[in-house]
Amino acid sequence: MSGTYSSFEAYSGAHQGVLDLKTYEKYARMAKNEIDRKTFGRAASAADTMAGALEACECELADILFTYAQVPGGVRSVRNDGYTIEYGSRLKVDNLETVAGATDRVCRKYLCHPENLMYGGIER
């Protein structure tokens, strides 16, 4: 698995991913970090029954993160007289909430059953 919860073979095969190997590896690592953050690090030691869910979640998150990264952003123009800075796309800012919601939704879909890795309360 090379430090991630999925493999390129699983991503391009069963999950029908469209990213090339190098791009997949970059976004799979980002997806793994997102999974680890949302599960408070518990995904790394999850039961074997969660392996398929972790794989599917990482593949779907990789696609979401890649798609978001393609949205144009940055400074498009600067005007000195009235001091105006115009950014490349309002879409980038607006999409931040959309991406956060999408990653949360995907993680909840895969990481709450049969073991709730996203549980934020006290474990007994």
Image (cartoon, rainbow, N blue to C red):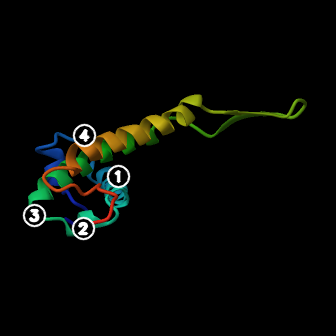
Q: Which mark is residue 51?
A: none
110 or 26, which is in the foreground?
110
Identify the amino acid type marked 3.
Asp
Q: Which mark is residue 18?
A: 4
Identify the amino acid type marked 1.
Tyr
Mark closest to the chain's N terminus, 1 or 3: 1
Alpha carbons under labels 1 and 2: distance apart: 18 Å
- In the image, taking residue 67 as reference, residue 19 lies left or right, namely left
Q: Which residue is mark 2?
A: 44
Element marked by disc 4: loop
Residue 60, picture quadrant: top left
The residue at the far front in this view is 124
Q: Which residue is mark 1?
A: 27
Alpha carbons under labels 3 and 4: distance apart: 27 Å
Residue 115, picture quadrant: bottom left
Element marked by disc 3: helix
Alpha carbons under labels 3 and 2: distance apart: 10 Å
The answer, for residue 8, to whether it is visible in the render is yes
- Neighbour class for label 4 at 10 Å: few (<14), some, many (≥20)? few
Alpha carbons under labels 4 and 2: distance apart: 26 Å
Residue contact between numbered discs 3 and 4, judged by CB atoms under 8 Å: no
Q: Which residue is mark 3?
A: 48
Mark closest to the chain's N terminus, 1 or 2: 1
In front of the other: label 4 or label 1?
A: 1
Identify the amino acid type marked 4.
Val
In front of the other: label 1 or label 2?
A: 2
- In the image, taking residue 105 as reference, residue 80 lies left or right, namely right
- In the image, taking residue 74 as reference, residue 118 lies left or right, namely left
